[in-house]
Amino acid sequence: MAKILLLEDDANLNETVTEFLEELGHDIVSVYDGYEAQEKLYESKYDLLLLDVNTPGITGFELLKEAREGDVVAPAIFITSLDSVDDLEKGFESGCDDYIRKPFALKELKIRVETLLKRGFFHESKELIVIAKNIAYDTRNNELVIDDKSVSLGHKESKLLKLFMKNEGEVIAHERIYKHLWDFDEEPSDTALRTYIKNLRKIIGKESIVSIKKQGYKFITGE
């Protein structure tokens, strides 16, 4: 489950997208104007931003540009009917990661959302994230570094560690981890998840991953 901020001033489209993404298991905070989105953006942390461009108050372009300057690192998708190259350039310059043009199929939205959510780091200002005294993660090269040496991780362990680091200090529910680690055609396994957790703990230290009974896991760095 991802927490998504949706800015869309068209009431019908806002409701449709909200219901669709909630049915997929995501937590949606929906707003109708730029100023309201601005307030919500600084009240909470989001995994993804879905932003209409031409909105009351401030535009999606202005909102995202300001957010990036304020170190908001969540990936962003612009939802827009604009189709000129200049608009496309302006959008990416403001800090977006993808575009979806109106009208669009909900299946396309699902694909774009899930693709971004499963990637690594986006607008992280720090190149190295310190996990413990001698352990860090290099966000530029996407590699774990222990005692100045690169350490290889399995595919699922790598995805799990990235999820933990992007949500440090938060309790991540089992269901959210399942959705992040396993593709739609794979069967999630609690036994496999425990194995991935065990493998990570051996590498980065048992104290970094705290098990919260009946809720999920919490990741804590040694910074």
Image: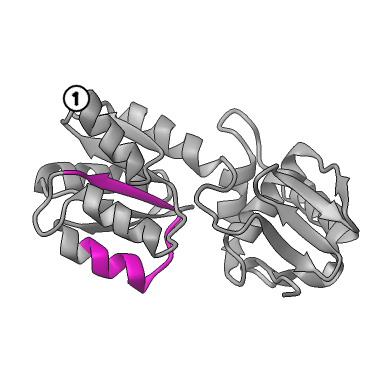
In the image: residue 183, left or right of residue 74: right
- Depth check: give the residue in front, 166 or 128: 128
Residue of label 1 = 84
Work out which quarter of the rendered image holds the C terminus and state it: bottom right
Q: Position of residue 45 (x, y in %)?
A: 43, 65
The 10 Å Cα crowd at callout 1, few under 14, some 14 to 19, many 20 or more, is few
In the image: residue 210, left or right of residue 23: right
Q: Is residue 118 above or below residue 202?
A: above
Residue drawn where x is 24% and y is 57% of the image: 30
Residue 36, by quadrant, is bottom left
State how many labels appear. 1
Magenta region, residue range: 37-53
In the image: residue 135, left or right of residue 17: right
Residue 96, by quadrant, is top left
Residue 43 lies in magenta, yes or no? Answer: yes
Residue 133, by quadrant, is bottom right
Residue drawn where x is 34% and y is 70% of the image: 42
In the image: residue 47, left or right of residue 185: left
Q: Is residue 62 above or below residue 99?
A: below
Q: Position of residue 22 (x, y in %)?
A: 35, 49
Q: How is the image coloured?
A: one colour
| Callout 1: SS | loop
Residue type for callout 1: Ser
Q: Position of residue 130 (x, y in %)?
A: 73, 65
Residue 39 lies in magenta, yes or no? Answer: yes
Q: Position of residue 178 (x, y in %)?
A: 61, 47
Q: Is residue 102 above or below residue 47?
A: above
Residue drawn where x is 65% and y is 59% of the image: 164
Residue drawn where x is 35% and y is 27% of the image: 108
- Depth check: give the residue in front, 173 or 63: 63
